[in-house]
Amino acid sequence: MSPEGTRRGGIALHWRILAGLVIGAGLGIAANLTLGPGNAAVAWICANLAQPLGQVFLRLIFMVVLPLVFSALTLGVVEIGDVSRLRRMGLTTLALTVLLSSGSVAIGLSLVNTLRPGDHLSETTRVELRTRFTAGESTARAVAQSHQAKPMREVLIDLLPKNPLQEMVGALDGSSPGGGMLAVMVFALLFGIAITLVPERTGPLVSVLEGLYDVSMAVIGMAMAIAPLGVAGLTFSLTATLGLEILSTLAGYVATVLLALALHATVVYAAALAAIARVNPLRFAADGSDALVTAFATSSSNATLPTSLRVAEDKLGIHREVSRFVLTVGSTANQNGTALYEGVTVLFLAQVFGVDLSLSQQITVVLMSVLAGIGTAGVPGGSLPLVAIVLVSVGVPAEGIGIILGVDRLLDMCRTAVNVGGDLVIAACVQRRESRRFD
Ligand code: ASP
């Protein structure tokens, strides 16, 4: 799924997705304004054409969520363990990754809780959305689940699955007996740590996991290939029934994500650069701009890696040993912008569906978003499967992703720039700590 691989007929994927959004929204609004929201012909088109198109796209993503999350997280840990010969550097990178990601999720959640962009919908629209994205009983279950929050003690114990397979089976529809997807993630982390303890006997197992990861990514590639049609279908059926109201709510959501990303970059990154790396943040941003622009244009941390490496070594003066390690691991494992976006999206959709999240559920969102940031592939749309699982784990219908898909590409460009910026910031901080070794 390299950006090159996403071109068809010379038109890059993001332009085709944008076209899908504009055409779907244009036709939907036109139908809503001229024929009215309840028109029978429009309802038929929505039910038999537009929504099935969107569903095919979403199901291609959902079907590989479990293998993808399991293999990505396990391999992520194995990779960090592998390089534990560079122990100090590995630990500093890991600590900074968790610190910066937690900061970014905290900023995102505070903003979305303050601005509440999903609250501006009328009750009729909310009910319409619930019926559309969940079928009868599961709607009731989703909303009911949100009211039956478990005590913190149980939430923590449930992080360790009694039977990981049972947790996996129920992870996508919220029917797991214990911690659901979060428990699956903890299992993957422990599995990865265990592999690093017996490296001499686990080579073939790691190869199988790499194969599983590649195959899952290939299926995501298929989903992205039909993304323009899926987005057009989903946006048409949303706007045809709900009109302009849904568009203004989405504008509020986009503004919240962008504001939170800007705050994270200008406050948290600047503070880390000034306090830990002891460099001037403005100068750093100017010198690193090639990498940031490439990330914005490609929406892929992985595709930006060669540019980041060049920028780090040539312009930011970061030692090759540090940049190779931190930027390579970071292009997949350190995704602050993505973690922030995932937290905001889950809370926004909870607001849209009228699902009240308890404190322990919000803490679950924070934990899962930080972990999801680590487990997200550095490719365009890599975080969508992860958003789905965080949604399910707090009782919000995963299909709700259909509401935000149309605007996702713009947000993807911006969060990827923040992700890559974060990798460079951590590299600069690690460089400072390691500087004595290079003197
Ligand atoms: N596109 C992002 C990246 O490559 C991942 C995501 O948030 O979808 O960093």
Image: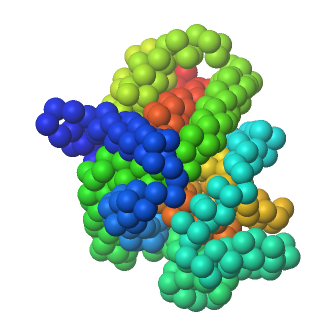
User: Which residue shows up at 28% across the image and 48% down it?
Assistant: 1
User: Which residue shows up at 64% across the image and 27% down it?
Assistant: 262
Can residue 305 be seen from the camera position used here? no
Q: In this orientation, which residue lies closer to the viewer: 230 or 364? A: 230
x then y, percent, for residue 71: 42, 67
User: Which residue shows up at 78% across the image and 62% down it?
Assistant: 357
Q: In this orientation, which residue lies closer to the viewer: 389 or 250? A: 250
**Is 129 left or right of 32, judged from the image as shown?**
right
x then y, percent, for residue 336: 59, 41
Q: In this orientation, which residue lies closer to the viewer: 339 or 187? A: 339
Residue 265 sits above or below residue 178 on the image? above
* Quadrant of the image occupied by residue 8: top left
x then y, percent, for residue 121: 70, 49
Residue 37 sits above or below residue 96 on the image? below
Residue at the far left in the pictured view: 9
Colouring scheme, one of rainbow, by chain, secondary structure, one colour: rainbow
Can residue 387 be seen from the camera position used here? yes
User: Which residue shows up at 31% across the image and 46% down it?
Assistant: 228
Residue 140 sits above or below residue 403 on the image? below
Q: Quadrant of the C terminus?
A: top right
x then y, percent, for residue 190: 57, 72
